[in-house]
Image (cartoon, coloured by chain):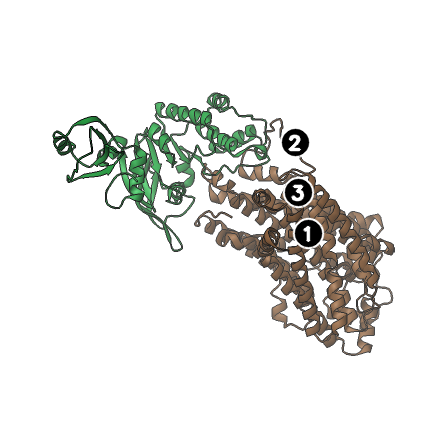
């Protein structure tokens, strides 16, 4: 059974179409990166999946259960980390854990203690006295300690310092090893690149690209940088975009096969040549800047 | 004022516009209605003399309106009747406005942003005050317009309107000071409300007992001593001026020194965990609100006890048949006996407990707008069980308040040997519930359908219904329109018999609206602030 499945899920707020006929499938055990800039519909998707907002059209399922119609059943196998860490100001972290565990029905207290240690939380402090990053850690510890089958994380590392970011990544990988599914909404590309098996890219409420990182890279162009002994030649090849990159150097962005470019270079004296696959950042930017199919900004 | 200060003042003003406009409309309407109504009901001096005989010494009427100084002129009557009520509303408005400007913004974290700009704490404080002063001027003008429209002389009207808003600076000072002392907005509001309630209680005692000197101890009493339309004493204005200067001075001094976001009475931020009342959202709501509940219980109990003590001094000795008829004209036939008086005062507890129910709707709404509800409902917690639990908690607390009021009113009355039985007073207390639950149900339905407007709707409808019951009869509104207010249908136990039909209808509406609310809340998006 799929962990997350949506069928034409759409949401309209007044005039704004926040999510446009989303088709999504996330398999159990997958770590799915959900990428998009601010306001692209990431949080809306999660709220619809959880049944917190009502779909304007289509449906969403968590382990086959439509959370709009049966939220309590749907949430039993799910843990959620909200985008903003608003908790109960007058409760301490320990009390917050107890409260959330009571409501969730199950929690792995040994693992929770380990996570408290790992995230260096002062659990006797009341939530109102915690910084945003520390409140975020409270949410993360509570969510991961449930050992839920599906973790819905909405920009979970916002507010975390680099050390805590490392701890967070370790925790996600542990969850993955245990076979838990992670749905990670983010705009931090390095994090998604490091953690996720598959990535979906959202733009203005539409899923514009989806696949494994390898698949996304294949679709994008690769970058070839060439330094010549003298002045660079004129290269006019189909599928190759050429830009000057210094006095004697060119940067070519190649869509499709690299063969014709190599053939063309055979007649020139090449001092250095490097080629690399597009980074996720380039793929991402491509979907927001490029309308001509060209990779890069 | 210019630049950043003006910007802060404009923002504060815009923030409070809905509440200020609502209050202004109420002030204008009540001022005009009282003048028109009195002139119409008691056109001649002879009529008015009879009215004075009936009401001049009636303690239950003084409870709401204060003490009259001159009832032979329309102006004197309006100063007593509208002035007495409006000054309480003005005090509430002022306290709310100050806490809103000085604490709510801070708790939301916006004040840090403001103070990171080129404006100091003192500047922001003054800017907030300036905005509230503009609001107070609006209230003054609305009252003045209402009085003049009812053909009262302009000079006297201006002075009466001034007397009404003279409490504003004092209670702005109270709200400002509470905002500096309290660790958060909720406690600031509780401190401020406590001060307003204490001022009202003092006025009640001063106006209805032999301790008349107490009138000088409460800002609401000073307003009476301004004596609009009855030999004005403008020098009394020095009292509110001096009091507000002291309160605001202390508040400003603290504001300049304390940490932004923290109060002087800051509770400890570390605590040993206590795991009680964390088993369900309803239990946790009780845990969060237990302090407020206790304050409500204490306040209600204290009020009820004092009113019970006063009750025994009410007597009908020497009231003629004619006076009885005059009393009947105002729908208060039996108020000249202890039990009649207690029955009439329980109208006040019906209002108070109804307002408590509104505050519970506000608490539910805040849990949603602060996004804690989003965290809860992403867990295996059903929407209906969450809202149902909150409504049951509110109903249970309302029942506790109602019975406390009944029991302590009896204790107060019995301590003076008044002939009132405990079961009768408990019945009077329980009799508050149908109306309160009705407003709880309506508030819940508003919450479930129009969340952002719901708190205003709940408080607005409750207040409007009460004001309508007090004043509509006087302006000669048709009977069917009087019947629109639930307060009109309450049997004033122990003076009047319990009205089962009205109670059943109200409870049925309460159940119907609550059920509709549970259904509708399951069908809407969660809505942020």
First in sequence: mark 3 vs mark 1: 1
Spot the residue most to the bottom: B44
Mark pair 1, 2: CA separation: 27 Å
| Secondary-structure class at tag 2 | loop
Chain the render paints green: A
Mark pair 3, 1: CA separation: 13 Å
Closest to the observer: B343 or A246? A246
Q: What is the drawing colour of chain B?
A: brown
Q: Which mark is residue B268?
A: 2
Occupied quadrant, residue A176: top left
Question: Which residue was labeled with disc 3?
Answer: B187
Closest to the observer: A65 or A39? A39
Question: Which residue was labeled with disc 1?
Answer: B95
Residue A42 placed where, x, y %?
Answer: 38, 41
Q: Residues within 10 Å of mark 3 (few under 14, many from 20)?
A: some
Q: Residue at x 65, y 59 (%)?
A: B135
Mark pair 2, 3: CA separation: 15 Å
Q: Which mark is residue B145?
A: none
| Secondary-structure class at tag 3 | helix
Occupied quadrant, residue B333: bottom right
Against B519, residue A178 (above or below) is: above
Chain of the residue that carries numbered disc 1 in the rendered image: B
Horizontally, residue B498 falls left or right of residue B54, namely left
Check if mark 1's residue and mark 2's residue have beta carbons within 8 Å: no
First in sequence: mark 2 vs mark 3: 3
Residue A38 placed where, x, y %?
Answer: 40, 43
The reply to whether residue B96 is in sight is: no
First in sequence: mark 1 vs mark 2: 1
């Amino acid at each position: 059974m799929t962990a997350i499945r949506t069928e034409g899920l759409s949401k309209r707020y007044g005039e704004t179409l926040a999510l446009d006929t989303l088709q999504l499938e996330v398999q159990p055990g997958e770590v799915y990166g959900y990428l998009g800039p601010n306001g692209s519909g990431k949080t809306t998707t999660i709220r619809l999946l959880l049944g917190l907002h009502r779909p304007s059209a289509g449906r969403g399922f968590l382990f086959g259960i439509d959370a709009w119609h049966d939220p309590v059943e749907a949430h039993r196998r799910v843990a959620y980390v909200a985008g903003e860490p608003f908790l109960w100001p007058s409760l301490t972290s320990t009390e917050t854990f107890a409260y959330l565990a009571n409501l969730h029905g199950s929690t792995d207290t040994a693992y929770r203690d380990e996570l408290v240690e790992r995230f260096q939380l002062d659990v006797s402090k009341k939530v109102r006295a915690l910084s945003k990053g520390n409140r975020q850690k409270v949410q993360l510890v509570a969510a991961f300690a449930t050992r839920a089958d599906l973790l819905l994380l909405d920009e979970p590392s916002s507010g975390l310092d680099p050390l805590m970011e490392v701890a967070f990544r370790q925790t996600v990988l542990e969850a993955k090893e245990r076979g838990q599914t992670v749905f990670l909404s983010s705009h931090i590309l390095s994090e998604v690149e490091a953690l996720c098996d598959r990535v979906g890219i959202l733009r203005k409420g539409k899923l514009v690209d989806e696949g494994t990182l390898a698949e996304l890279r294949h679709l994008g162009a690769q970058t070839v940088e060439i330094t010549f002994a003298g002045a660079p030649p004129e290269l006019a090849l189909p599928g190759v975009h050429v830009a000057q990159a210094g006095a004697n150097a060119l940067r070519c962005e190649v869509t499709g096969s690299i063969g014709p470019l190599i053939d063309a270079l055979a007649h020139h004296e090449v001092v250095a040549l490097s080629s690399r696959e597009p980074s996720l950042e380039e793929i991402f930017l491509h979907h927001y800047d490029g309308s001509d199919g060209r990779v890069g900004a | 004022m210019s630049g950043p200060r003006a910007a802060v003042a404009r923002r504060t003003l815009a923030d409070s516009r809905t509440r200020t406009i609502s209050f202004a409309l109420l002030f204008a309407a009540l001022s005009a209605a009282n003048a028109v109504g009195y002139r119409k009901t008691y056109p001649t001096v002879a009529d008015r003399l009879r009215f004075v005989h009936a009401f001049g010494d009636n303690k239950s009427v003084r409870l709401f309106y204060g003490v009259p100084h001159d009832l032979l002129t329309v102006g004197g009557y309006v100063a007593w009747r509208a002035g007495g009520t409006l000054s309480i509303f003005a005090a509430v408005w002022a306290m709310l406005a100050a806490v809103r400007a000085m604490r709510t913004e801070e708790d939301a974290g916006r004040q840090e942003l403001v103070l990171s700009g080129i404006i100091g704490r003192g500047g922001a404080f003054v800017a907030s005050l300036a905005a509230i002063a503009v609001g107070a001027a609006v209230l003054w003008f609305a009252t003045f317009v209402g009085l003049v429209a009812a053909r009262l002389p302009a000079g006297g009207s201006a002075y009466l309107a001034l007397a009404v808003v003279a409490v504003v600076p004092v209670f702005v000072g109270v709200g400002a000071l509470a905002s500096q002392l309290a660790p958060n907005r909720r406690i600031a509001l509780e401190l401020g409300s406590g001060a307003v309630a204490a001022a009202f209680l003092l006025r009640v005692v001063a106006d209805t007992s032999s301790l008349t000197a107490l009138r000088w101890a409460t800002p609401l009493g000073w307003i009476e001593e301004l004596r609009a339309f009855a030999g004005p004493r403008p020098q009394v204005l020095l009292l509110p001026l001096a009091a507000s200067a002291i309160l605001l001075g202390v508040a400003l001094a603290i504001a300049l020194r304390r940490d932004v976001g923290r109060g002087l009475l800051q509770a400890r931020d570390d605590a040993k965990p206590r795991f009680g009342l964390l088993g369900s959202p309803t239990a946790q709501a009780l845990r969060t609100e237990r302090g407020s509940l206790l304050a409500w219980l204490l306040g209600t109990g204290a009020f009820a006890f004092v009113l019970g003590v006063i009750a025994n001094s009410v007597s009908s000795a020497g009231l003629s048949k004619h006076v009885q008829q005059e009393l009947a004209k105002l729908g208060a036939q039996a108020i000249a006996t202890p039990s009649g008086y207690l029955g009439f005062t329980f109208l006040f507890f019906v209002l108070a407990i109804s307002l408590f129910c509104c505050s519970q709707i506000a608490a539910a709404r805040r849990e949603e707008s602060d996004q804690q509800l989003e965290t809860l409902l992403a867990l295996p917690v059903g929407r209906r069980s969450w809202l149902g639990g909150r409504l049951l908690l509110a109903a249970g607390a309302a029942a506790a308040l109602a019975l406390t009021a009944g029991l302590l009113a009896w204790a107060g009355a019995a301590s003076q040997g008044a002939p009132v039985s405990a079961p009768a007073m408990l019945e009077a207390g329980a009799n508050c519930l149908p109306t309160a639950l009705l407003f709880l149900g309506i508030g819940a339905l508003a919450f479930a359908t129009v969340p952002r407007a719901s708190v205003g709707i709940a408080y607005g409808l409750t207040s409007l219904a009460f004001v309508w019951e007090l004043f509509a009869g006087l302006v000669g509104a048709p009977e069917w329109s009087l019947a629109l207010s639930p307060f009109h249908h309450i049997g004033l136990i122990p003076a009047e018999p319990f009205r089962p039909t009205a109670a059943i209808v109200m409870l049925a509406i309460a159940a119907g609206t609550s059920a509709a609310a549970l259904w509708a809340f399951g069908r809407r998006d969660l809505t942020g602030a």
